[in-house]
Image (spheres, rainbow, N blue to C red):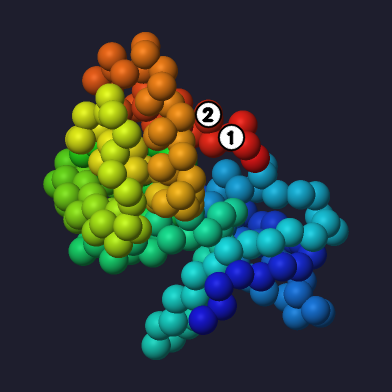
């Protein structure tokens, strides 16, 4: 399994059906990777070095490398294609349309209306994604071994914040530190919307990076 590649950006081509291919030169070997269309704007210029996190799909007739800007994005892609009826192109469309954070929050919050904004995702597919992936993210949270919750946070809000931050790539220790810190905010404690808690936690974590 090829988990990531670090090399020189040799070429970027847009093909049919909004598919974007990155040619990455790694030790004089050119790897073709299908990437999210919006990644074109995030990558360094041609000739610069970058790291791409990858997923290798092996079929009877071909092997395809998919490239992502972060490990969390790659891992969510893998979770998406594990859902019945979700292929690689639909998973890429979901990530490209919504972005990593909004996609995770829609899954955790069961917001099928947001999920259905992606072309090709109907209401039934959105419901299936939300149901199956929230269950998997909940199992992931349980395996993370998070400690008891700080005071002032409702259990359902804490669960959604923890699942979202873990899926975004933060460690269990970072999640608990963020929750402990932001729970001191008396105005935030009054909030019953998990989105506000998530935004505050991410903002607090970003200060330390």
Image location of residue 100, percent across then percent down: 45, 44
Q: Is residue 105 left or right of residue 22?
A: left
Callout 2 environment at 10 Å: few (<14), some (14 to 19), or many (20+)?
few
Q: Residue 203, which numbered label?
A: 2
Image position of 47 with respect to 58: above or below: above
Callout 1 environment at 10 Å: few (<14), some (14 to 19), or many (20+)?
few
Image position of 154 with respect to 128: above or below: above
Label 2: which secondary element: helix
Q: Is residue 16 left or right of residue 189?
A: right
If the image is split into quadrants, where does the C terminus sit? top right
Residue located 37% across and 13% down the image: 186
Residue located 53% across and 59% down the image: 71
The image quarter in which residue 191 lies? top left
Say whether marks 2 and 1 touch (CB < 8 Å): yes
Residue 140 appears in the picture as rendered: no
Tell me the residue that label 1 is attached to.
206
């Amino acid at each position: 399994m090829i988990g990531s590649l670090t090399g020189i950006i040799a070429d970027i081509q847009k093909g049919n059906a909004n598919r974007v291919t990155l040619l990455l030169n790694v030790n004089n070997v050119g790897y073709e990777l299908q990437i999210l269309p919006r990644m074109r704007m995030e990558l360094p210029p041609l000739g610069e070095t970058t790291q791409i996190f990858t997923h290798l799909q092996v079929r009877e007739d071909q092997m395809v490398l998919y490239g992502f800007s972060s490990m969390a994005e790659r891992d969510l892609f893998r979770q998406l294609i594990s859902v019945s009826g979700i292929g690689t192109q639909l998973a890429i469309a979901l990530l490209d349309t919504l972005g990593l954070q909004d996609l995770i929050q829609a899954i955790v919050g069961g917001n099928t209306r947001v999920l259905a904004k992606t072309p090709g995702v109907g209401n039934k597919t959105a419901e299936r994604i939300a149901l199956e992936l929230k269950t998997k993210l909940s199992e992931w949270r349980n395996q993370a071994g998070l400690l008891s919750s700080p005071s002032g946070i409702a259990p359902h809000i804490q669960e959604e914040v923890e699942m979202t931050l873990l899926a975004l790539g933060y460690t269990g220790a970072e999640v608990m530190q963020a929750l402990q810190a932001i729970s001191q905010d008396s105005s935030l404690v009054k909030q019953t919307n998990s989105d506000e808690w998530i935004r505050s936690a991410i903002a607090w974590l970003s200060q330390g990076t």
